Image: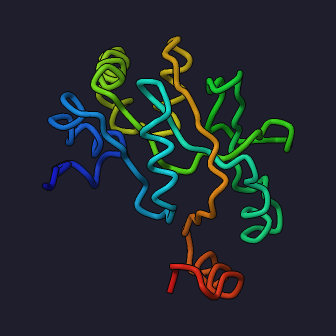
Amino acid sequence: TYFENKRWSQTNMVMSLVAAKEWLETDTCITSYSDIVYSSDAVTKLLNFPGDIVITYDPNWSDLWLMRFDNPLSDAETFRLDGDRVIEIGRRASSIKEIEGQYMGLVKYTPVGWVKVNEYLKKLNQEEVDKLDVTKLLQGLIDSDVVVNAVAISDQWFEVDSESDLNVYKSSFPLSPIR
């Protein structure tokens, strides 16, 4: 099944997600960034973790970022928790202390969670919605007192933002699924 964001060139990720509202309104759905590689175990943990909006995160994120960047703070975003509840995500980090993990790009939405997303989106004007990426959506939900839970994933995963990322993974993990 394909869902098309006919305005993809003028919008960001959230409008593409909205195109799949038919499924998100009726079933628990897992959404994924298209530039990540992760284990089926990560999906299982995410599906089984309680909550209406749940994300995966890597508490050992710095190992991966140190392989990819001379200065991990050049790319890493803030991520702070209160128990398993996310209290901050996606801002520019000025210190490692602001980063308790890194969001991996996987989100579980239950139909109840999707209602909360829609209620939040209705508070924004169309231009704001058009510019919204997933981490800004998650932070906006958090700022609106919507609970976003997080489950730690210790399995190996990869984010491939560039050819240099791909080359790092190929040389560091010769038996990895990235070929």
Horizontally, residue 172 falls left or right of residue 26, namely right
Which residue is found at the position 48% from the left and 21% from the top?
141
Instruction: Assign the N terminus to one quadrant of the image.
Output: bottom left
Which residue is found at the position 71% from the left and 51% from the top?
76
Horizontally, residue 82 falls left or right of residue 66, namely left
Residue 82 horizontal/vertical position (percent):
71, 21
In front here: 78 or 36?
A: 36
Residue 48 horizontal/vertical position (percent):
45, 36
Does residue 63 lie above or below 67 as drawn?
above
- Label count reads 0
In front here: 99 or 132?
A: 99
Does residue 178 lie above or below 67 as drawn?
below
Which residue is found at the position 62% from the left and 85% from the top?
170
Horizontally, residue 140 falls left or right of residue 2, namely right
Does residue 19 lie above or below 147 as drawn?
below
In front here: 42 or 179?
A: 42
In front here: 125 or 164?
A: 164
Toward which corner of the image does residue 128 lie, by quadrant? top left
Residue 70 horizontal/vertical position (percent):
82, 68
User: Looking at this rendering, what residue extends furthest in the top direction?
Assistant: 145
Residue 73 horizontal/vertical position (percent):
79, 52
Q: Name the colour scheme.
A: rainbow
Which residue is found at the position 31% from the left and 40% from the top?
29
